[in-house]
Amino acid sequence: MIRQYSGIVPKGDLLLIQKLCDKLKGRSFIHVNSTREGGGVAEILQRMIPLLKDLGIDARWEVLEGDATFFEITKKIHNALQGNREKFTKKMWEYYYEVNRKNKRNINLNADAVLIHDPQPAALIDFRRKSARSGKKIWIWRCHIDVAHPVSGVWSNLRKYIVQYNSAIFSVSKFAKSLPIDEFIVTPSIDPLSDKNRELTDREINEVGDQFGIPRDKPIILQVSRFDRFKDPIGVINAYKIVKKYNDCRLILAGSPATDDPEGEAILNEVRDYAGNDPDIHILLLPPDKHKEINALQRMSDVILQKSIKEGFGLTVSEAMWKEKPVIGGAVGGIPLQIVHGLTGFVVYSVEGAAFRIRQFLNNPDMAKRMGQEGREYVRNNFLITRQIRDYLSIWYCTMNRGRHVLEL
Amino acid sequence: MENNIEPFEFKQCVSIVKSTGRYASNLSELRKLISRVGDESIFHHVYQYFLKGHMLEYTNDFAHWAGEHLEERALAERLSSIDPYTLKSVSEVRKELIREIDDFLSHFPEPRDVAPGGEFYFNETVSLVFPVGVKTRNLAEFLVAIGHIDAGSIYYHFYDSRVRLGEGVVDDFSRWIEHTLYRKKVADKIRAIDPFMHSIESIREHIKEIVEECVRADMEGVED
């Protein structure tokens, strides 16, 4: 299975994955999250579990089961960890704990390494067997969300579980907390073989263009993101309007509706109103599973934006860079980690900045091409799924060898 | 004959980043934390800067932060001029960083905070070192290998060796070429590559050029 990635990802990553799997052969590695489908965590697990099995690891993936009340509570926890004020009662935390306790009965947590994803199943650590606490079993908590500025009461409730783990993993340094356990940094990744990122034929790309009625007669500027204020779709239209005074072009805003956001529909209507009757602005509302269509839109574009004003990691930037597209992103969340300003794209701080950089790319195709190529290479070395698998295995191995800063394999 | 030659074994270093959970919002906080964090963190932010693979304007993370986030260019230049390979240990690097910052603070004692999101986060790493399965016994084989190994392997042999092998030792490549192949001129040319002025890819290209020139000369019977 791992051979599928040969020639695409860095050789060293494949080699290290195999070497670590040789060391860890026959051991059990269980992942627990709260959804089988949808979202980046499920995407990586779908790919990673069979790959690890193929390399001799006894890998399993378990999903926490909960009812609507539980997921309403964990949605609030999620929002509060991202800094939004939410009302919590003692009963809600008891319910959260109780669902974790019930799941303990159904999920076999007896494994050499247990990786728990996000807050929903975090309390499972409380049910770790006593023998496992003193032994060599390793429990790791993986946080995929931005916890840089959490609501303190919510974080402290969760923290009492997190400190029981052997180590924690955060996506970005600034999300890490001051904890008495080891904290590793593992950035998210994209899968170069998935429908969203695989190579497409010209025919496939053209079909999508036709499907959405997008003529290929002028340069295309694209932003792919949910329709919410933090992605600044109005700012993107404003930047396009500035560019349009100098360079003829089209703008595509493509994304899924923010169904869990009560403001989602209002923002979409606002964006539509603001775009007016401009035939060169295309607002595309796509269901979240339209991966190939998003891939094609990215590949037919000339400049790709992610002009967010608040962002988790913003993997759409890496998706665009993988397709050798020049990118422009807001200086928030994980975007500056992906865009090396002036080398793999431009980081901007304003509508005017975005417009200026779009014009630069449209008027300097050589520069756009060079940055696109640099961007792909940067993603190849840093943001592909094999690097994330490599990191998980490395952290397991490092935690087994805690205290050593250099490990020879 | 070649069977008696100790081959050059290419290895690679992959670093897994660990957070210390500490960060600085201004220069005074940075100074305080530089004096307190472990050697591993200083090592990561200074020596492992070159692992990033691309050439930036500065030569370590502290200088980069001073220039890009504090917007104190003069301080950034001075921090960038610290050569960690001429200093004997990480603690000497730490002393030099503190000396430069103290000097700057004596002239500008009230540093301002960076914009939110621009804080300096202190990290460290655990390094995993492994052979990549390539051994070379002569310069022609070496030339093929250097073109195909990952950037992490060039980092390990060109930068990490300077610390790993101690004072006075340069890179693994030139050491092997001089002491095993007895080609001192080639080794000297590789040693003349300024480690601070190139990206890893550019270092790869320079080494390729140097070795290729030598291999071509050998094939043409030209003595070096």
Image (tube, coloured by chain):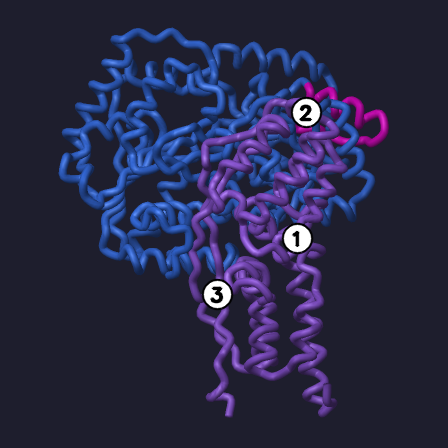
x and y, in percent, of residue A195 in the image: 49, 43
Residue at left 35%, top 32%? Answer: A180
Dot 2: few (<14), some (14–19), or many (≥20) neighbours within 10 Å? some
> Along the horizontal axis of the image, is B187 left or right of A108?
right
State the SS at label 3: strand
- Indicate the quadrant where residue B178 lies: bottom right
Looking at the picture, tell me which residue is in the foreground, B93 or A122. Answer: B93
Look at the numbered discs 1 and 3 and tell me whether their residues touch, using CB distance below 8 Å: no
Tell me which label, 2 or 1, sits earlier in the chain: 1
Q: Which chain is purple?
A: B
x and y, in percent, of residue B141 in the image: 57, 79
> What span is in magenta?
A235-252
Q: Which residue is mark 1?
A: B83
x and y, in percent, of residue A261 in the image: 48, 14
Given this view, does label 3 or label 2 mark the residue nearer the observer?
Answer: 2
| Dot 2 amino acid type | Pro
Residue at left 80%, top 37%? Answer: A360
- Indicate the quadrant where residue B65 lies: top right
> Along the horizontal axis of the image, is A162 left or right of A360?
left
Q: Which residue is mark 3?
A: B11
